[in-house]
Image (cartoon, grey):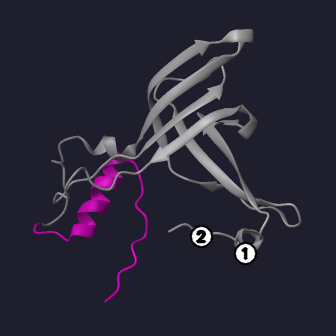
């Protein structure tokens, strides 16, 4: 669960609040005015639930850019923040980390160039043999998840359990 500031919560209480977005690609920020479209998905299940199944989240976006300086497999981080005419803007909240899979550059009327990309989150990095465990088996599920995440170079969210 993501922690938000008191300012963010106060802005959401105002009737005339709105949201702004930005996209960071390979360390470069693209402002809302440069973003034509941006959509994330987080699929929980295919058609039916499966045991041990995990699914990758996706990010699809189009920006006003010729793609110069955007490397293949670039990291993409979508952000949003709440904005109020009276309270100002909240902090930027990151909503995932994705990697470019497919890309397309097209030129339209008036010399406008559009960079489109389809991205996956780091879950695809888990599509590899898990054979170098240092755990004593049988092992706790949380320890297995943490070990796999470490091997993938990512961190896990804190899980709150009700006992």
Rendered location of residue 25, percent (x, y): 60, 34
Q: Residues within 10 Å of mark 1 (few under 14, many from 20)?
A: few
Q: Which residue is mark 1?
A: 6
Look at 27% across and 68% down and name the residue there: 142
Disc 1, SS = helix
- On the rendered image, what quadrant is the C terminus found in? bottom left
Q: Position of residue 94 (x, y in %)?
A: 59, 53
Residue 50: image location, x then y, percent:
17, 57
- Relative to 138, 58 lies left or right: right
Q: Give the tally of numbered discs.
A: 2
**Residue 22, label in figure:** none
Q: Is residue 161 visible?
A: yes
Can you tell which quarter of the image residue 58 is in?
A: top left
Compared with 50, 110 (above or below) is above
Q: Which residue is mark 2?
A: 3
Q: Residue at x 22, y 68 (%)?
A: 141
Residue at image coords 20%, 71%: 140
Assign a secondary structure to mark 2.
loop
Name the one closer to the observer, 94 or 39.
39
Give the image location of residue 112, x and y in percent. 70, 15
Residue at the extreme left: 138
Q: Is residue 68 visible?
A: no
**Residue 151 among magenta residues:** yes
Q: Is residue 67 left or right of residue 148?
A: right
Residue furthest to the bottom: 163
Looking at the rendering, the stretch of residues picked out in magenta corresponds to 137-163
Question: Does residue 6 appear to the left or right of 59 in the view shown?
Answer: right
Q: Is residue 148 magenta?
A: yes
């Amino acid at each position: 669960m993501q922690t938000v500031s008191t300012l963010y919560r106060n802005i959401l209480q105002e009737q005339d609040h709105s949201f702004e977005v930005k996209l960071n690609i390979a360390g470069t920020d693209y402002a809302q005015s440069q973003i034509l479209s941006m959509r994330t998905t987080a699929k929980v299940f295919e058609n039916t639930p499966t045991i041990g199944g995990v699914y990758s989240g996706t990010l699809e976006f189009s920006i006003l850019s010729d793609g110069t300086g955007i490397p293949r497999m670039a990291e993409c981080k979508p952000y949003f923040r709440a904005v109020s005419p009276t309270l100002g803007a909240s902090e930027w909240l990151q909503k995932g980390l994705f990697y470019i899979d497919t890309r397309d550059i097209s030129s339209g009327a008036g010399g406008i160039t559009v960079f489109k990309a389809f991205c996956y989150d780091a879950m695809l990095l888990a599509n590899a043999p898990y054979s170098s465990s240092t755990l004593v088996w049988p092992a706790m599920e949380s320890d297995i998840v943490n070990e796999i995440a470490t091997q993938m170079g990512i961190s896990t969210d804190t899980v709150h359990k009700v006992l």
